[in-house]
Image (tube, helix red, strand yellow):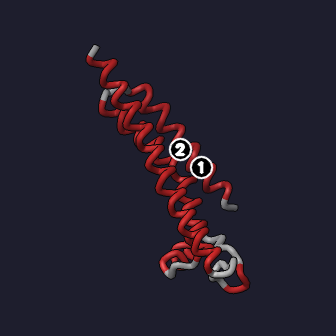
Amino acid sequence: MFDKQKEKNIERQIGVTLRIGVVISVSIMLVGFVYYLLSNAQTGLSGNHWPQQFNTLIVATMQLKPGAIMMFGLLLLILTPILRVLASIYAFYTIKDWQYVTITTIVLFILMLAMFIGQN
């Protein structure tokens, strides 16, 4: 019985992690979108381009450029499943379910590999 309750708590915590990630990222995208509309549909970057490199995205977001703010929210939305996988690894580690720790770590490795391959 104790294990079932602990599993439910873990599932609930992982679900909350996903919801928080989505709410934060969508909120940031909405703030960026409103700012974009208020600035006459200008991204704030030269040539009205959207940031495509991580360094440009971070610098432009810190400078409060509307296009960069929206893209930063999108980046956070993309990173949310990765955060979920990390939370799952931790959750399985706390209940000492080594089989799922191993499987979830492999999933994390595949996600990271896909991100790095996708950049080229």
- Taking the spot 48% from the left edge, 35% from the top edge, the residue there is 104
Please state if 55 lies on the left or on the right of 51 as rendered.
left
x 55%, y 54%: residue: 77
Q: Which one is in front, 12 or 103?
A: 12
The location of residue 53, given as percent across then percent down, is 62, 71
Examine the image and state in which quarter residue 75 appears.
Answer: bottom right
- Furthest residue in direction front, as rendered: 38
Residue ranking furthest to the top: 1
Mark drawn on residue 113: 1
Query: Residue furthest toward the left?
Result: 2
Asked whether residue 91 appears in the rendered view, the answer is yes
Residue drawn where x is 71% and y is 78% of the image: 49
- Work out whether residue 53 or residue 41 is closer to the camera in this orientation and state it: 41
Picture mark count? 2
Q: CB atoms at circles 2 and 1 under 8 Å apart? A: yes
Residue type at mark 2: give it: Phe
